[in-house]
Amino acid sequence: MKEIESILKEHNAYGATFYEIGEHAPVAGIQKGVQFFKEAGADVIVSVGGGSPIAAAKASLYFLQQESGGSY
């Protein structure tokens, strides 16, 4: 993760890292992630890991899209 953060920072593309997604991407973790995304002022989500982080990223983007009425 540190290497990925470093690469993103080199390209001025790093905002923050969210680690609080549990196994099987629980809704509470996704909601925390959505809030974290908004507070960080991020434009994109980069998911690293297995199925749970990837599923959580997709669900987070879905909820963000629903809130904004647009697309992410």
Image (cartoon, grey):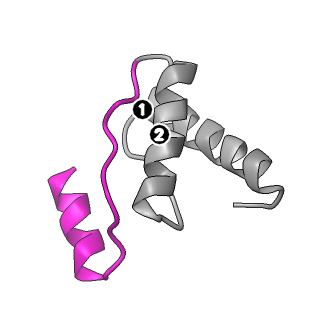
Q: Nearer the viewer, residue 10 or 42?
A: 42
Point 34% across, 43% down: residue = 18
Q: Is residue 41 left or right of residue 66?
A: left
Q: Is residue 55 above or below residue 37?
A: above
Count all numbered tags in the image, as a single digit. 2
Q: Is residue 17 left or right of residue 39?
A: left
For marks 1 and 2, give the CA distance: 17 Å
The x, y position of residue 19, in whole percent, is 31, 37
Determine the residue positioned at 53% across, 43% down: 34
Q: Tag 2 or tag 1, which sits nearer the N-term? A: 2
Amino acid type for the residue under numbered disc 1 = Gly
Q: What residue is shown with label 1? A: 50
Magenta span contains residue 6: yes
Quarter of the C terminus within the rendering: bottom right
**Marks 2 and 1: in contact by CB < 8 Å?**
no
Which numbered disc covers residue 33? 2
Give the foreground label among 1 and 2: 2
Q: Picture coordinates of residue 57 (x, y %)?
A: 54, 42
From the viewer's perspective, is 46 left or right of 27? left
**From where the camera sits, is residue 46 visible?**
no
Task: From the viewer's side, name the closer residue of 7 and 26.
Answer: 26
Neighbours of disc 2 within 10 Å: few (<14), some (14-19), many (20+): many
User: Could you say whether the residue bearing mark 1 is in a helix, strand or loop?
Assistant: loop
Q: Amino acid at mark 2?
A: Gly
Residue 39 lies within the magenta run: no
Horizontally, is 45 left or right of 59 in the view? left
Given residues 10 and 16, the one toward you in this image is: 16
* Magenta part of the chain: 1-22
For label 1, the crowd category at 10 Å Cα-Cα, with few meaning under 14, some 14 to 19 and many 20 or more, is: few
